[in-house]
Image (tube, coloured by chain):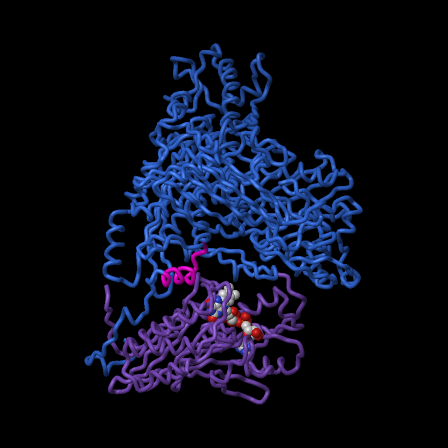
Amino acid sequence: MSSDSERFAEAEDGGPQPEKHCGHGRGGMGEEVKRKEDQRFITGRGNYVDDIKKPGMLHCEIVRSPHAHARIENIDKSRALKVDGVVAVLTAEDLLEHDLATMPTLMDDTQDVLVNDKVKFQSQEVAAVIATDRYTAKDGAQKVVVDYDVLDPVIGADKALEDDAPVIRDDIEGKEDNHCLDWETGDEEATAKAFEEADVTVKEDMLYQRLHPAPIETCGAVGDYDPGKDKLTVHMTSQAPHIHRTLFAQVSGIPEHKIRIVSPDVGGGFGNKVPIYPGYVVAAAASYVLEEPVKWVEERSENIQSTGFARDYDMTGEIAATEDGEIQAVRTDVLADHGAFNAVAQPSKFPAGFFNIFTGSYDIDTAYGTLTAAYTNTAPGGVAYRCSFRVTEAVYLIERMVKVLADELDMDPAEVRRKNFIQPEQFPYESATGWNYDSGDYEKALDKALEMADYDHYREEQQRRIEEDADKLLGIGVSSFTEVVGAGPGQSCDIAGVEMFDSAEIRVHPTGNATVRVGVQTQGQGHETTFAQIVAEELGMDVDDITVEHGDTDTDPYGLGTYGSRSTPVAGAAAAVASRKVREKAKAIAANELEAAEEDIDWDRESGQFHVTGAPDRSISITEIAAGAYMNHPKSEEPGLEAINYYDPPEMTYPFGSYIVVVEVDRETGEVEFEKFVAVDDCGNRINPMIIEGQIHGGLAQGIGTAMLEHVTFDDNGNVTGGDFMNYLLPTSMEIPEFETGHTVTPSPHHPIGAKGVGESPTVGSPPAIVNAVVDAMSHGGISHVEMPMTPDTVWEKLDEAGLSMDPADNVSLEFDDQQSGGTADD
Amino acid sequence: MKPAQFETHEPNTVEEAVSLLESLDDRAILAGGQSMVPMLRFRLAVPETVIDINAIDGLDYLEEDDGWLRIGALARHADVEESDLIDEQYGSFADTAPLVADPQIRNRGTVAGAIAQADPKGDWGSVLLAHEGEIVAQGPDGERVIPAEDFFLLPYDTTLDENELITEIRVPTPAPREGSAYHKLKRKVGDYAMAGSAARLVLDEDGRIETADVGLTAVDITNVRATDAEDHLEGERPGSEVFKRAGELAAEQSNPESDEHGDAGYKERMVNVLTQRALGDAAERAGLVKRRVSQ
Ligand SMILES: Cc1cc2nc3c(=O)[nH]c(=O)nc-3n(C[C@H](O)[C@H](O)[C@H](O)COP(=O)(O)OP(=O)(O)OC[C@H]3O[C@@H](n4cnc5c(N)ncnc54)[C@H](O)[C@@H]3O)c2cc1C
């Protein structure tokens, strides 16, 4: 028997925790319950936006600008309107009539829905063609004639800030340059002083290149205005349906209770589906104007070229340290490319997101960071691609710099980390830039990873290869990252003014099963299973008796959506708290049924039963209690058995881990192969280990894509040259090595079930481990950095620079063997 | 996939296909569709009619016959990949097949279609050049045989007549003491070559190189032969130093362009490395023994 307070007592003191698997066979916490949602996905019965069909539904194709910077002189719709089946062609002029020509970005900038005057990036939305089917819509789009006055494009944040750069945002009054914002954090003077006095300082420039989240399902919407009810329903690929409803109300002037956003099955979001895009607004506006449902679904290249990109931080990192590797200060300066609008997706009081967590897992009391962001003629973005708002860039910076420091000092990078870790007893820990870390045991995770990776063996093997001048070098990379996830608290974190709380509502039905509705929205994370497990654990129900719903603003409680690994930290907490509220009421009903006093009723987590104190056989299950709640409710209580909780987290949670990557670098070609990939994660108490494992695998794959393959590139004319899957290379299972995963458990002391978010740790933590490994293979040649993506040519240039490149003739000699000389070919 | 509107025809014989080609104006041939469908999808191709040749019987063969390895126009990349004959006798083909595109594309795409597409980044063109292969085409006036060397004109442009259908790709069966290989550098499965090199060597009784053919991928406006390297190799005794010089000559003769896939200097360097590697494997398959200096 265990109670709440026993079970989470350890969590409350924040000390190191034993691992718990205590689902009690009902599918609660710690059980590897098979994902409930997979039945429909595996059998092809998912229901995505593009699966939605409505009677009379029309289709929308967007005409996009081929130029990055151009003034629109004229748009001729006439030929398009003559195409059989084309119903309407919309331009900014038409939208102006309905006051729908612009929309706010999440950072309160103003973006044209359809370009009114000046195109600011290639593929920007210029006109929309509505037709009876999607082929005809495309035929029509090809017939819209747009005259452009082409202007000089501004590509690259550095170029954008040059004095004579053309001004992109002349729509902002008085704007005479491309400067977007400045930001700083930490203590400039103290940091400068620490650097002056330090034994050792190191500095490195590194670009976190522009990426695209590239979810497998592109963005899309079905706008469906019902003139009878005067109600607008928008089915859309949304990670945050409620906030999108609020924004739609603000843009359109339609009252919020007359708007319903439905986010059906969503095929991956990764931050790409947090912002509002013109396509959504056009589909809704067209439906409103034409009074028919209108569907818009992006093509792949439209998704990559026009929707929210991620990263694009050009960073300088510096560390000041003692001779024996104790870090005294860290400093950074960032040049950020925000694209044509300030449309980063992060809490509004954090213009650089959570980048100021760049002191990482280390006890560094002096830090200073600055950032300048610029507008360029590229698609707007800066979305949190599978991470919490720029924590990825921060982790990359510090984890790369620690390796640079280790090389400078000729120390083992694992040792430098160990020396500087925040110690378990220091938690809760306040960092130099004001973060409040909840709990951690970094050394434990690192030790486990080192052991799993057989670190010493690979260090020896690495040395052997160097000594023998082998054609393949070995590199070992370490990353001991700390994430910060689960925004709010509402006081410091808001999206467009709305506090970042989240919600769960539980309705237990008369026959003993339950419906749970949450304010977050799954895009593949497994919420329908995870949240059911939390409720199963907290109510003693069977997980199969619980259905989780989400994604419909008409029925679900308001929430801020799923990104920044906030679902379990915030909505998961709400689910636990709501369950406990139900449990409290259940006690009253149990007392009534068992004819005992309410204060004499205990709940037993193990059996899931309510019983009279000291008399375990006088017990009653939640199923019986549910019946009682509707059929024999105690007069002291309202009938029914429901609860709702809006959870404003007191703090964020800080999952962490250590990743170790071993690579082989081919000295002839610069190709990199993975030898070993170990990931040890700590996300506090674990709800469904199988889902966690799946999340880790997926995120590591994306980390590999980041480090090795992906880059949204542009030419000098502003053409996107990495804007489709032939040029924007995503990893497949063929590029992914075998992952060895492990875990430690350090519960969050403030989370109701001691859990932390986990979905994003691997994307955040793995790129520096991979880059560190490749650098490590060449560090004996003096190489301190390799830019991502580490394509063979990038790596080969470094090999060559270090005098480590090799010719095949140095490696193989061919001899003629007499015996085989007369043999057949192709032996 | 939102192509412009088109009609389809599905001929059952080569003759039917050729007469459709002759009688219809604005038409395109569809084999495995792995290049054609993307072109339709991007509306780079907007034919009125698509002639789908998949219903033609008897074009999916892969066999040795009369001194030739014959690959019918409907043999898929996967057929080559899975063939024991290829595995045992044709090193360069066995190397190439699993490196083309990805498994899904290889299940549908044909070797003949890839040759017809004439993408300078395509792999089969180099292999065909290194084997002094031929393209067999059927037109209104009957059959025509085009040596691979005379086939490729420009990117996506060949000497095939617009009324001709490729029926077969063929290369001579290997001589005694022949070996061949293909090496390709790519960044991921499904990626075209950054550079590629196909090599074939035939040794004489003394173990000297009698014939050397080298074909290069993705480093010129078409797949090309590295003739300077070939000239240097012929008459020489195979060995790392000779191959090294051949690699250098191949690199010098190549004309790669800088792009997102790497700069020109690197690609030239890789032509050198890949050519040396391909020659090394070809020599080994011709009966030599490879010995590593280090490791
Ligand atoms: C993602 C991707 C990756 C790829 N990677 C590679 C790679 O790594 N290496 C490589 O070599 N190739 C690669 N390809 C190209 C692939 O090999 C070709 O698309 C394919 O093999 C072409 O054959 P098909 O049968 O599909 O031809 P189709 O697409 O049907 O036709 C291609 C062209 O050939 C013409 N054609 C086809 N058959 C005949 C015929 N019998 N007679 C006359 N004309 C004909 C068609 O009219 C069309 O113009 C890739 C393609 C894709 C989509």
Question: Residue A577 at what x, y percent from top left?
Answer: 51, 25
Question: Going by the picture, which residue comes out furthest to the top?
Answer: A597
Q: Which chain is blue?
A: A
Point out the image quarter for the N terminus of chain B.
bottom right
Say above or below: A503 vs A174. Answer: above
Say above or below: A774 vs A618. Answer: below
The answer to if A799 sits in the magenta stretch is: yes
Question: Residue B77 at what x, y percent from top left?
Answer: 45, 70
What residue sits 53% from the left and 87% below the top? B143
Question: Residue A802 at what x, y percent from top left?
Answer: 35, 60
The colour with which the image depicts chain B is purple
Say above or below: A769 vs A504. Answer: below
Q: Is residue B94 visible?
A: no
Residue B155, quarter of picture: bottom right
Question: Going by the picture, which residue comes out furthest to the left?
Answer: A819
Residue A717 located left or right of residue A73? left
Residue A607, quarter of picture: top left
The stretch in magenta equals A788-801
Q: Is residue A498 visible?
A: yes
Residue A523 located left or right of residue A680? right
The answer to if A715 sits in the magenta stretch is: no
